[in-house]
Image (tube, grey):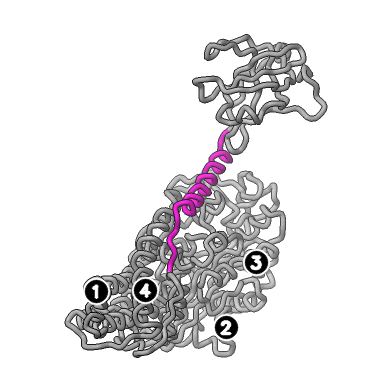
Amino acid sequence: MSETNFARTTVTAALIYANGPIHIGHLAGCYIPADIYVRYLRAKGHDVAFISGTDEHGVPITIRAQKEGTTPQEVVDKYYVQIRDSFRDFGISFDIYSRTSKPEHHEMSQDIFRQIYDKGGFVEEVTEQYFDEKAGQFLADRYIIGTCPICGNENAYGDQCERCGSTLSPTELIHPRSALSGEKPVMKPTKNWYLPLDQLQPQLQAYVDTHPEWKTNVAGQVRSWLTEGLKPRAMTRDLDWGIKVPLPDAEGKVLYVWFDAPIGYITFTKELKGDGWEGWWKAKDTRLVHFIGKDNIVFHCLIFPAMLMADGRFIPGADNVPANEFMNLEGDKISTSRNWAVWLHEYLEQFPGKQDVLRYALTANGPETKDSEFTWKDFQTRNNSELVGILGNFINRAIVLTEKNFGTAVPKRGILTEIDQSFLTDLAAFPAKLGESLDNFRFREGLALLMDVARLGNKYLAETEPWKALKTDRAANRPERAATVLNLALQLSATLSILAEPFLPFSAEKLRGMLNFNEKNWAKAGHPDLLPEGHPIENQGLLFQKLEDDVIDAQVQKLLDTKKMNELATKAPAPQKEIIGYDDFAKLDLRIATIVAAEVVPKSKKLLKLTLDTGLDTRTVLSGIAEHVSPETVIGKQVTLLANLAPRPMMGLESQGMILMAEDRDGKLQFLQPGEGVWNGGTVS
């Protein structure tokens, strides 16, 4: 069914776990595409509700609480605010951003569970599940870690491998271990309620078959599941954090997080729309679109529709699920645990006023059909070469030339030439072409077309050369030609302010301010008379600013430092050396000495010549620490000396002992120093 046949559109963006900040992978995979689409629908005058929020149940929340030494509620309270504010400041235009810990959501989730239960829609089953004997509790999927049977990742979760994206069950993991204690879990019987996906498969197959327009990555994954044959899936878990199962014999059990999370879309719509919420989820003329990442495809295309079908009161599934693939970062997979990410709240602090630059870079390189990669150099190039060099350059030329030669008003249009007519014909075609791209969720293509509009403007100015026409017109005392060219350039600028709104909302707003133009109606874009003669304009400066190398280099260095820290954190200690007796240790003369002089050994990059007061004598020790410390900083320091090491000739000098050093977390060597009050010559025993 065409989108024009729907009375309203419910657009959802995946509920993110409230256990950490947002990173660019989240933005590129789900939230920016959703926001572009919603802003486009609004510009077309469609009735749309944009729904999202935080997922505040499930094991990731409890794991974060354990790491931070706090409670799950304190964790979700903290991250809900941070995530909500980051989205707001970045310009993601949700109609509502709520949370699943609200009592209203608990009630809705329990109501839907009870509805399915009362209709006989669940299968009650006692099964063997993993149990941590040391922790004394059953282990939910995310509390079980092991080796992925698909890709060999040794840290795959019991429900999913984050490296290869495969959906798993706990029993499929090789060498499973508990995330709580690290112990190998045992199997123990427990009762849960299962949604019989196998029985619902014919309905789900029919539903999927009615949507041949789904993206190939979505359709391929869904059909693979259907081909393998669906199996019953437990909708309850043995946990103490979550929504209580509304049955008398379900003590200590909560709803499966993937049962309650998508219901959040319904709950939040009710919170937004009040008594009118049902039309957005029950009316046949409502269009439902889910924006998600590829790791959530099975839940939104099969499990959530199965729940809605089993309930029987709602639209039985989304009209479209334009899921994206993953975005990587500087040659590596984004990882929260390894801090390998560009965090949105940090970006907003470090790049104030540049929300649209990140929106542009992530959209231009969005992972629509395959995994893509973000690099800071590409970010800089897209800003400087495209936003500054193409879009910003055109707007600046059009407004500055007008202001300089005709004042702060749209000049009068004269007779149109063949070049002008061709220009207006090309301009008029862009809104429909760009709209077709967005209708079909091809956001990269749509953004490229937006830049082509700016290129059209630059090409038109280059061909018409209004600066030359101004000289000719002034000589003949007739400025009509340049005025006509700049009038049309400003008309294109007004069209750009409409077409840029979904992609670059902050820049579009600034451009509208320059043009004193408040129109956002998509149908008006491409029109040759958006700005009448004499309409006031205002030069408010450059639309985009160039990014210098030092700004980008600082971000690259930050990631390099993170990589180094990760390598050190996972660095295995050197194996223990051969066992020695006490008599061997007693032969070592370890004592405290003070460095009284230090200098670099000529022709050596590593050696320092140290003069030591050992309490017994003054001696020379050569130490390979010149890359870690400078001579002037070590004078006066007390160090630990192996005093009875046989003298050794080095670089024409003799070293009489060895300074003991240790490697710190950054890989630098540090002196092993005594505490206060230790005298020179004091022995170490």
- C-alpha gap between disc 2 and disc 1: 57 Å
Q: Is residue 275 above or below residue 505?
A: below
Numbered disc in front, either 2 or 4 = 4
Side of 629 relative to 289 (left or right): right
Ranked by sequence position, the earlier of labels 2 and 1 is: 2
Residue named by callout 2: 272
Q: Is residue 509 above or below residue 177?
A: below
Q: Position of residue 152 (x, y in %)?
A: 45, 45
Residue named by callout 4: 395
Residue type beneath disc 3: Gly
* Label pair 3/4, CB-CB below 8 angstroms: no
* Label pair 1/3, CB-CB below 8 angstroms: no
Q: Quadrant of the C terminus?
A: top right
Side of 161 relative to 439 (left or right): right
Q: Which residues are magenta?
A: 544-572
Residue type beneath disc 2: Leu
Q: Position of residue 478 (x, y in %)?
A: 24, 85
* Label pair 4/1, CB-CB below 8 angstroms: no
- Quarter of the rendering containing residue 213: bottom left
- C-alpha gap between disc 4 and disc 1: 19 Å
Residue named by callout 3: 242
Ranked by sequence position, the earlier of labels 3 and 4 is: 3
- C-alpha gap between disc 3 and disc 4: 52 Å
Q: Position of residue 176 (x, y in %)?
A: 56, 46
Residue 338 visible within the image: yes
Residue type beneath disc 1: Lys
In the rendered structure, find residue 468 and report the number of the disc placed on it: 1
* Label pair 2/4, CB-CB below 8 angstroms: no
Q: Position of residue 143 (x, y in %)?
A: 60, 53
Picture residue at 53% right of the left edge, 41% below the top: 564
SS state under label 2: helix
Picture residue at 56% right of the left edge, 36% below the top: 571
